Amino acid sequence: MDKIDMARKNLLRQSEEVSGTKIEGYDFDKGVNYDEIVGSFASTGAQASQLARAIEIVRKMLAEKAFIFLGYTSSMVSSGLRDIFRYLVKHKKVNVVVTTAGGIEEDIIKCLGDFVLGDFRASGKDLREKGINRIGNIFVSNNRYVEFEKFVQPILEELWKEQEKTGKIVRASELVWKLGEKINDEKSICYWAWKNKIKIYCPAITDGALGDNVYFFKTKREDFKIDVADDTKELNDSTIGLEKSGLVLLGSGVAKHAILNANMFRNGADYAVYINNAQEFDASDAGALPEEAISWGKILPDAETVKVYGDATILFPILVAGSFTKEG
């Protein structure tokens, strides 16, 4: 056999036929139909098909009336996703929320003034001189944090007086509800959480401007405390005995892990959708795939799961449009 015949044999070897979904995209000759465009993701391949799978899983969560845990990072509240989270809480589409301190404070701060689109490549030195804070390509005047302090300090004083009177330490989730009650603004996630009695847990309550305000407050009220232990127990308890548990985890870090860890106490969730860009090469929980969570008992072995790699500011609105808004 000469070299060409050998190369041809190696390259053009016979194979089995593959059965399954035919790869094809949307046909724009049919015009523009956004539902059909999103529907076509299922047969597009790559992350489009992962997103289609995520939509399918969330639809199953809703159809099975699963208890839905939503986790997201603070930067998502800095972005326009804040308004989508508000929609989900307002209409009771989710049962529990877990976020970071920024996910609380920036929801409230946006009620006090606007965030503005900026530039990823803006000079940090120039912005610092102008008193403008940058969150990616989102600009926030430092005046917002001055106004936030004026708003928060009287609330902390009120809670401290209640603590002095009753001896009961306020929970982090109760502080979030109090912020929502006091802001009294229908644009706020925290407002609707308080209104609908949906718990927002914040295991890292002191990380951020909210923590800065607690620091300032404790310089004059050293005995003021915030209880995160009772919140941890309540979050963990909320998973035990659930008929079905569904997880929608946007981004990574403490919000993702707190929800997964809580579901370990029921031996794992039934459904899980991850959207983030983190990789698992460093053995971090941030980048860990659902299979790793299964090994810990955080997700059930036969659960329906998917990880979508990408930017939640692009992907999550599409997911919500294809799932939560379809549910009566």
Image (spheres, rainbow, N blue to C red):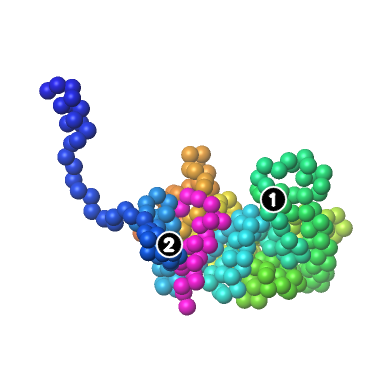
The residue under the point 75% across, 49% down is 133
Q: Amino acid at mark 2?
A: Val
Query: Could you tell me residue 142's position as x and y percent?
Result: 79, 53
Q: Residue furthest top?
A: 2
> From mark 1 to mark 2, how far is it between C-alphas?
29 Å
Q: Estimate the x, y position of residue 227 in percent, counting from the top left.
A: 70, 62
Q: Which residue is mark 1?
A: 118
Amino acid carrying mark 1 in the image: Gly
Pick whichever of labels 1 and 2 is earlier in the sequence.
2
Question: Residue 217 occupies which quadrant of the picture?
Answer: bottom right
Residue 158 visible here: yes
- Asked if residue 97 lies left or right of residue 40, the reply is right
**Residue at the location (43% across, 66% down)?**
33
**Which residue occupies the foreground of this view, 328 or 64?**
328
Taking the spot 39% from the left edge, 55% from the top edge, the residue there is 49
Report how many numbered discs are placed on residues in the image.
2
Q: Which residues are magenta?
A: 306-328
State yes or no: residue 323 in magenta: yes
In the picture, measured across the screen, residue 187 lies left or right of residue 246, that is: right
Compare residues 25 and 301 and report the one nearer the observer. 25
| Residue 299 can be seen in this image | no
Measured as percent of width and height from the top left, residue 117 is found at: 68, 54
Image position of 262 (left or right of 134): left
Prevailing secondary structure class for the magenta stretch in the rendered image: helix
**In the rendering, which numbered label is found on residue 38?**
2
Q: Residue furthest left?
A: 1
Question: Which secondary structure, mark 2?
Answer: helix
Residue 30 position within the rendered picture, expressed as x and y whole percent measured from the top left: 37, 64
Q: Judge whether 314 appears above or below 173 on screen.
A: above
Q: What secondary structure is marked by label 1? A: loop
The reply to whether dot 1 and dot 2 touch (C-beta < 8 Å) is no
Q: Residues within 10 Å of mark 2 (few under 14, many from 20)?
A: many
